[in-house]
Image (cartoon, rainbow, N blue to C red):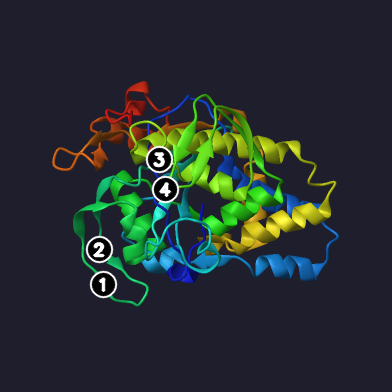
Amino acid sequence: MTHSATTESRRAQPESGGGRRRPKRRRWGRIVLLSLLAVVLAAGGTGYWLYSDLNGNIDGVDLDEALGEDRPEKLPTSGQNVLVLGSDSRAGDNAGLGTGKVAGARSDTALVMHIPEGRRQAVAVSIPRDTLVTRPECTKADGSALPQAERVMFNSVYSTAGPACVVKTVEKMSGVRMDHYMEIDFAGFKGLVDAIGGVTVTVDEPIKDSSSGLDLSAGTHKLDGTDSLAFVRTRHGVGDGSDLGRIGLQQQFMIALLSEVKKQDLFGSPTKTYKIADTLTSALTTDSELASLTSLADFARSMNGVDPASMETVMLPVAYDKTDPNRVVAAQPQADQLWKAIRSDAEIPESAKKSPATGG
């Protein structure tokens, strides 16, 4: 998951896989980022120092200043759209997590979370990291201009130009205006799992991946933070070894994570609540409008009507690139149908959920 660099500088992105779509209605664990923070505030009575300490952990990116006016129109029926990234920076606390020696950072996990008007349900659209996209002209963190480029890997945009350019790229490819941005890094993800005492998953077949370090026999396992990170990053041990095969594991884990959090009595354990919130906020980067506990809690409360059980996960429909079969491109007309449904707050047609590239 990820932590990014303040205002575009300190954070990196993970290499997340785009994969094939799993069951239609799934809980998406990332909503825990918002709900946990709301719990911390709701607990109350912890004093201003506690609020100030947690509040100061959060990094903010000013998207309005970085993106200017060249953005999709905010439609009255478009609901709320949040770009959620998990980044793979190997710097700082992430350095010793067995994530490799790759320089810089990429977006290991990327999804657009769409919360329709009325906030009764939500949809999460995963964007495969190996998707070839057109990166629009962007301004880098040092203020220099980065020209438009075609056929670049989606997960490279973060390391090349920072989070604001990732938002701009998603807006250009989808025509959907992003209202908010959230990012959590490897160390934050690991810390969250350890703070809640681990997450239980069940696998039907053994998984062994020397790259991620994951070695699981078939059956049920309780994973600590390190093993959980390996689980969501595993690609060589599942499917055809591509990043597309990894998305199923990521979705499975997020459901298990959310279930674990919901089972725990956070109100009954202020110490654990603080530990989780401190871990989370330390690893969290958001857009400047959400970069405070108050704003995050207000947004979380506005989503109280959303039933996690009805949340649907969809992968951006992709096809293998004809020039480079190790890369994928948005499949048409399915991708356009998907984004049109998101823009108009309409039900996503079944045809828009079918991806020619399956990942084996």
Q: Secondary structure at mark 2?
A: loop
Q: Which residue is mark 1?
A: 145
Residue 108, compared with residue 207, is above or below; it is: below
> Is residue 83 or residue 224 the one in the foreground?
224
Q: Which residue is mark 3?
A: 235
Rate crowding at label 3 as few (under 14), some (14 to 19) or many (20 or more) other CA atoms within 10 Å: many
Q: Given contact means CB atoms under 8 Å apart, are the residues at marks 2 and 4 in contact?
A: no
Q: In the rendered image, is residue 240 in sight?
A: yes
Image coordinates for residue 167, horizontal then vertical, percent? 38, 56
Image coordinates for residue 34, horizontal then vertical, percent? 62, 49
Q: Amino acid at mark 4?
A: Ser
Q: Secondary structure at mark 4?
A: loop
Q: Quadrant of residue 32?
A: top right
The residue lying at 31 percent from left, 60 percent from top is 70
Upstream in sequence: badge 2 or badge 4:
2
Rate crowding at label 4 as few (under 14), some (14 to 19) or many (20 or more) other CA atoms within 10 Å: some
Instruction: Give the CA distance from mark 4 to mark 1.
Output: 36 Å
Upstream in sequence: badge 2 or badge 1:
2
Q: Given contact means CB atoms under 8 Å apart, are the residues at marks 3 and 2 in contact?
A: no
Q: Which residue is mark 2?
A: 137
The residue positioned farthest toward the left in the image shown: 323
Instruction: Give the CA distance from mark 4 to mark 3.
Output: 9 Å
Instruction: Give the CA distance from mark 2 to mark 4.
Output: 34 Å
Q: Given contact means CB atoms under 8 Å apart, are the residues at marks 4 and 3 in contact?
A: yes
Specify whether 113 is left or right of 158: right
Q: Which residue is mark 4?
A: 211
The residue lying at 67 percent from left, 43 percent from top is 198
